[in-house]
Every structure is written in C-alpha cells, then in structure tokens.
Amino acid sequence: MKRKLDLHTGRPVWSAYRAPSVPVTPLKRDATADVLVVGMGISGAMIAEALASDGHRVICIDRRGPMLGSTAATTALVQHEIDKPISILTRMIGRDKAERAWQRSRLAIANLEARIRERGIECRMTPRQSVYLDGNVLTPSLLREEGLARRRAGLRSDYLVPSELERRFGIAGRSALLEHGNLALDPRKLTAGMLRAAADRGTRLHAPLEASAIETLSSEVITATRQGPLIRTSSLVVATGYELLDVLPPTSHQIISTWALATKPQKRAVWPGEAFVWEASDPYLYMRVLHDGRVVCGGEDEPFMDEQHRDELIPRKMDTIATKLGRLFPLLDTTPDYTWAGAFGTTATGLPLIGRVPRRPNVFAVMGYGGNGITYSQIASELVATALSGERDCDEDLYRLT
C-alpha cells in the first residue's frame, strides 16, 4: 500500500442506523477469477456488482472490511451537479467536454436510481431537488449565467431571485439555482445492498485481506496479499478511494479534510421540500435532511495535513458549521448530535480519474475525487464494465488517467 490514512474520526450519523450485514470470508488459499476488485466501499461494491451482472467471475477484497473506509463518513448528497460549475469548467477543458461531463453526471443519477430499483436495494432512496446558493465563487449575476450555461447543455436549471427563494425554502437574502433529479439515500445500506447483490451473482467477498504486491503480465495480474494467498486474475480494478496502491501512477490530486455534524431529529423545523442546499463558495457549506428529520451539514474543507491536525480542529469546525447553518435556518436547533471528520480527494477540474493505468492495460484505477463520490462510482462501474466487455465508452476521455 502506498499510503494508508485514518479516513474518518468521530461518530458519523450513519452509526445511528442499522445496515445489512455483508457475507465476507477469509481467504485461506490461492484463488483465481476473471477480475479482482480491491476495495469494498461504494465504488468497489458498484463495480463488483456490475461486472458480476455481466457474467465475470469476480473476487472483491478489502484490508479493513466492507464499508469501513470513506463510506462511513460520506454525507450522501447524490447530485448530478459537479463541484466545478459548468461555466468555470468550460474555461478549463472546453465547452464540449464540460457539457459532456455534466450530462454524463446527470445520466449517472438516472441510471443509479433505476439500478437500485431493479436490484431491490433498500437504502431509503428518495428523489431530491437541490438549491445552489450564490457565494464568493458565483455572485448573483454569475449564478444566473451559470444557469443559462446549464440550460444550453440541456440541463434544467431555474434561477430563483431572493424573494422567490425565501418564499419557497425559507432562505433569506440569497439567490439560487434550483436543480432537479438528485437522490438522498443511506450510503451504507446502498453499499451493503450492492455487495450482497454481487455475492448473489457469484462474487467472492474476502476480508480482511490486504493487497501487498501486484505483478502485471501480458495476460494475467498476480496479486499477493499480506495474509499469504495469491490471487490470479485477467484484470484488476483498484477502488481504494484515497488510499493509493503502488501500482497506480502519480496523479495531480490533493487530499482534503472535511467536517460534518448531524442534529437531533426535528421534522417540524426543517425547510420545505427538504431539498439539498449548498453554496457557490470556497469553502462551501452543504446540507441535507435525513428520513427522521435530522439535518446533516458539512463543509469548512481545507487541505489535509495529518490526522491529528484534522481531528484537533473538530470542535472549532463544528462551532463554525453550526453557526452558519443557524444563519440560514434560524428555526433549527443546530446543536450537534453526531460529529465527525473525514478525508476526500480532489482534482483541479473536480472530475474523477477512471480508466486503464498507463503501461498496465489490464489494471484499472477508480479514483472518485471530488464531492460527487457516489455519482462518480456509478460512472466508474459503467466505464469499467464497458471496457471489460471489449467496447469503448464515448466519455472515457473525460476521466482518463494521464
């Protein structure tokens, strides 16, 4: 392992709700399969399920166990809106690529919703609008231009003037873009559901099991494990999130620390429609309502230094987040009931890195950077499944490792 991180600290709110168990077993002898997926978080689970559905023989391993990495710390605002506004992304990578990235993200949400329903996964999935507030990145006039850019790309986006925003959502003194077609869900229930669906299709789930060395040959990948057994496969998918294996090339990414809180349940105090709310600011605040009326609010992101520094900041960050949340929604009791800190990765464009590893064509990397982790996990499962079927995804150039 190239880098190991303590991916979260504190008590994430998901510990308040039971997730289905996942049937993992130890691996006691050498094994063979078509594909090895390293990682049993959201990305690994979605990829394993997609490949198993396509008829591949899959083994999935994790050094901790299912859902014990970043999955436990996500706030699970499953949005098609990319962290990088389309108007800004256009200046970075061109209009065609920017529009395709946003369109693919929107399609991924629709595909994920259909997939969850088809598999019968119970994860408290609920459609949600999102409210994107003006801020220090996009002023009201720039926010209006951003809405027009989204509409030019074929994406519905409604600009709300301050009076309309206050009337509909109770937020005073701001303007916003109202977006549609996002999903609220429980990330642990989603991940467990995908892993169980993969297991039902023959995927072998082994944990705790850590990949310690990887040898790539022309038609075979040999993965040694710290526990002893070797795993021989035709292809390898590395879905270890923000902990990178040595087989992956250096990439221009940055690890970020983020903080979040969850309030006590207060159904009567939450805003109308329970839309996601986030800001066109840096750093930005983001919030959602859970099924029982708890409000989850996170943000105050800053570059990761080390786990100790991140954790020492928890009390101050919680005070800041609670204060900002209270300014937006004065009727809420913003006293934290759960608090936690986590790590995630980001790239300059906010787009993930997904695809074949250079000079190792039978190794795929899935690095779902940015604030759209679950959305990008769905895209990764589509791209990898298409590649292993021998076809080419029309958007693979957007996410290619360089």
Image (cartoon, grey):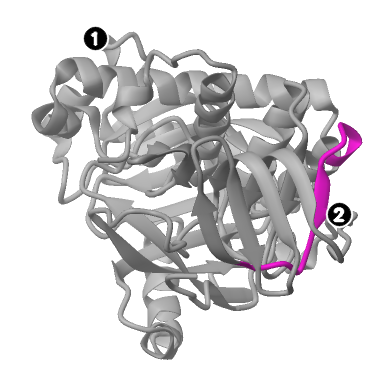
Q: Earlier in the sequence, mark 1 or mark 2?
A: 2
In the rendered view, does 125 fall on the left or right side of 257? right
Q: Quadrant of residue 361?
A: top left
Work out whether residue 214 or residue 154 is closer to the camera in this orientation and state it.
214
**Coordinates of residue 92 in the picture (x, y in percent):** 12, 33
Residue lying at 74% horizontally and 28% vertically, measured from the top left: 56
Q: Amino acid at mark 2?
A: Val
Q: Secondary structure at mark 1?
A: helix
Pointer 1 local density, CA inside 10 Å: few below 14, some 14–19, many at least 20: few
- Residue 134 appears in the picture as rendered: yes
In the rendered view, does 10 fall on the left or right side of 260? right
Q: Amino acid at mark 1?
A: Arg
Q: Which residue is label 1 attached to?
A: 152
What is the number of the mark on residue 4?
A: none
In the rendered view, does 332 fall on the left or right side of 302? right
In the rendered view, does 51 fall on the left or right side of 332? right
**Coordinates of residue 253 in the picture (x, y in percent):** 27, 56
Magenta segment boundaries in residue numbering: 199-211
Q: Does residue 11 lie above or below 220 as drawn?
A: below
* Quadrant, the C terminus: top left
**Coordinates of residue 288 in the picture (x, y in percent):** 55, 49
Please state which of the two labelled residues, at mark 1 or mark 2, is closer to the viewer.
2
Residue lying at 57% horizontally and 44% vertically, measured from the top left: 236
Q: Secondary structure at mark 2?
A: loop
- Residue 325 appears in the picture as rendered: no
Q: Is residue 205 magenta?
A: yes
Q: Is residue 196 magenta?
A: no
Work out whether residue 347 or residue 325 is closer to the camera in this orientation and state it.
347
Q: Which residue is label 2 attached to?
A: 22
Residue lying at 72% horizontally and 67% vertically, measured from the top left: 209
**Coordinates of residue 223 in the picture (x, y in percent):** 62, 57
Work out whether residue 17 or residue 307 is closer to the camera in this orientation and state it.
307
